[in-house]
Image (cartoon, rainbow, N blue to C red):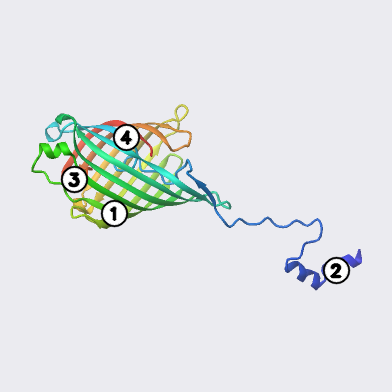
Amino acid sequence: MFAAILVLASPMFQAGQEAGNPPPPGQDLPAPVEDSWDLELLPSKIIYAPYLADPRQSHTSTKVQVPVDPDRGNLKIESVLGSTRPLALWTNPNDPLEEAELFLEAAVFSRFDLSEDWDMDGSDYRFGFPFAYRYGDVAMKFHLWHLTSHLGDEYMTRNPEAKRASYHNDEVCVGLSWQIDPYWRAYGELGYGLYTGTAAEKGRAQFGIEWVGEAWTGKTTPWAAADISTRKEIDWGWNLSLQAGIMFRSGSGNGGLRFLVEYYRGHDQQTQFKAEKEHYFAFGAATNF
């Protein structure tokens, strides 16, 4: 016994332990620390969800726009066909609050004039590759995206003097999203065009706030959101969108379908008509992303 104590206390034994020699029987090794993040391909969750009240987020929707002043606009339908899909999700195994994600977004935004036999006024096409990082309730986004704009054939036939504006925009933007509590979310975003057409200018800002209430039954919840945006090409005039309705969430949590009513005032969101003003109420349905 006394000899064993001398051996354990000897400098040579301690040096051997520090050099990585096996510990004496019965002594456990410390658990190794994971250095690599866990990777999940095509995950169901998205850590930086599209903005609910932004008319130009990539999702699928249809809404009927009713002008506040019928003498200054026609009854129209705005249709969006698109989606935002996560491609890869990285999670820190040592800290579940820390995640990063790459996703794809793409959509086509088309407008049809019901007062002109459902003629299509124009359509905008966009796609992008956002990358997001989240820690806790705060998420950041770095987003590269492209948009190009086109006039409708029927509109050009009806207005032979109309010329398609050379509008395209390759933009880089950064966004910040804060989940204030389980119900409230605030966000802000700044964008700058890297390569633009002659009808587009560089510079954009956007911010907003969202509320998704407690579920009534199952995954049915009330919601409301406000989005304010501005662009240099409209002399930094403001566009305001207020939306509210009922949301039916899917099993993945933040997906699903929502029914909405909207109040909009600002510049035309169809970029071929960006110099024109719009003021309308709308109702319709949309996917969350």
Task: Tell me which amino acid carries mark 4.
Answer: Ser
Query: Seen in the image, is 102 located left or right of residue 56?
Result: right
Percent coordinates x, y for residue 74 in the rendering = 16, 32
User: According to the image, label 2 marks what residue?
Assistant: 7
Circle nearer the N terminus (4, 1): 4
User: According to the image, label 4 marks what residue?
Assistant: 61
Query: Seen in the image, is 243 located left or right of residue 120?
Result: right
Report the residue at 81% width, 61% height from top.
24
User: According to the image, label 3 marks what residue?
Assistant: 272
Circle nearer the N terminus (2, 3): 2
Task: Tell me which amino acid carries mark 3.
Answer: Gln
Say which of marks 4 and 2 sits in front: 4
Disc 1, SS: strand
User: According to the image, label 1 marks what residue?
Assistant: 170
Label of residue 78 in the image: none
Say which of marks 2 and 1 sits in front: 1
- In which quarter of the view is residue 124 placed? top left
Circle nearer the N terminus (4, 2): 2
Report the residue at 30% width, 46% height from top.
126
Percent coordinates x, y for residue 69 in the rendering = 15, 33
Q: CA distance from mark 1 to mark 3?
A: 16 Å
Q: CA distance from mark 2 to mark 3?
A: 86 Å
Disc 4, SS: strand
Q: CA distance from mark 3 to mark 4?
A: 20 Å
Q: CA distance from mark 4 to mark 1?
A: 24 Å
Q: CA distance from mark 4 to mark 2?
A: 77 Å
Task: Tell me which amino acid carries mark 1.
Answer: Asp
Disc 3, SS: helix
Q: Residues within 10 Å of mark 2 (few under 14, many from 20)?
A: few
Query: Seen in the image, is 271 located left or right of residue 86?
Result: left
